[in-house]
Amino acid sequence: QKEVEQDPGPLSVPEGAIVSLNCTYSNSAFQYFMWYRQYSRKGPELLMYTYSSGNKEDGRFTAQVDKSSKYISLFIRDSQPSDSATYLCAMSGETSGSRLTFGEGTQLTVNP
Amino acid sequence: GAVVSQHPSWVICKSGTSVKIECRSLDFQATTMFWYRQFPKQSLMLMATSNEGSKATYEQGVEKDKFLINHASLTLSTLTVTSAHPEDSSFYICSTEAGQGVHNEQFFGPGTRLTVL
């Protein structure tokens, strides 16, 4: 079983839709949770960084962490064609330092 | 966030040759850098952790004699793929750790696409 599970998609939505991306994990030691956006043939770009449980909002993006369920989400409101990319969740624990464990990534297409 | 560059952005080489990829931290001094490999439609797999002035720490299953890492300065880490073979063709990405805490944000370079013929 993978430590981090993420539905690879692909996910296709119309412009303006609310997008929900999710990851589950099995390692209860994970404390730091991140979402990265990766455009084709580019390096990942950090979108959201959260510590422990709770919500964090930044513009059209909201990250949620539910440690009791080992479940994290990223919501994108008013999705735009420029949001079309692969979204990767990543996480790490107190003892792993900055070593990240990534999900498989979800490929998102927002259609105009 | 931190700015990380990689060079070259893409490279094509013949089987059996060696290829060097550079990772530079442009706006801060990076004690630690990470090297990842990403195959098409797959996630990033950590290959090794590069520490300035010391030997790199390799992940299980990664051949340290094949993937040579040098982190000689606080702004530059290099990955050399020795005796490259077609199965080494992949997208190689580095990242730097920004901060001095126990856990710090990672910022990624743009990646280097290696094709071995």
Image (tube, rainbow, N blue to C red):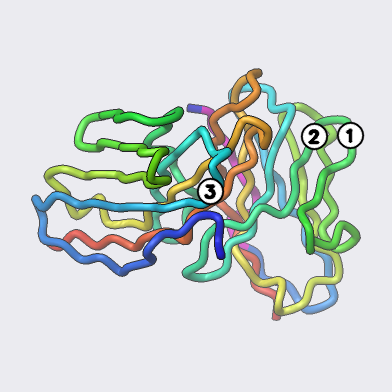
Disc 3 sits on a residue from what chain?
A: B
Q: Nearer the viewer, mark 2 or mark 3?
A: 2
**Residue type for callout 2:** Asn
SS class of the residue under badge 1?
A: loop
At mark 2, the secondary structure is strand
The residue identified by callout 2 is B51
Q: Position of residue B60 (x, y in %)?
A: 78, 58
Measuring from the top left, give residue A36's x and y in whole percent.
42, 45
What residue do we see at 44% from left, 39% from top?
A: A34
Residue at 36%, 60% (x, y): give it.
A106
Q: CA distance from mark 1 to mark 2?
A: 6 Å
Q: Quick one: which residue is furthest to the top in this view? A: B100
Mark 1 vs mark 3, foreground winner is 1
Q: Secondary structure at mark 3?
A: loop
> Which residue is denoted by mark 1 in the rendering?
B54
Pinpoint residue B18: horizontal percent, then vertical percent. 83, 65
Q: Are marks 1 and 2 in contact (CB under 8 Å)?
A: yes
Using residue B53 as the reference point, say whether residue A25 is left or right of it.
left
Which is nearer the N-term, disc 1 or disc 3? 1
The residue under the point 41% across, 59% down is A6
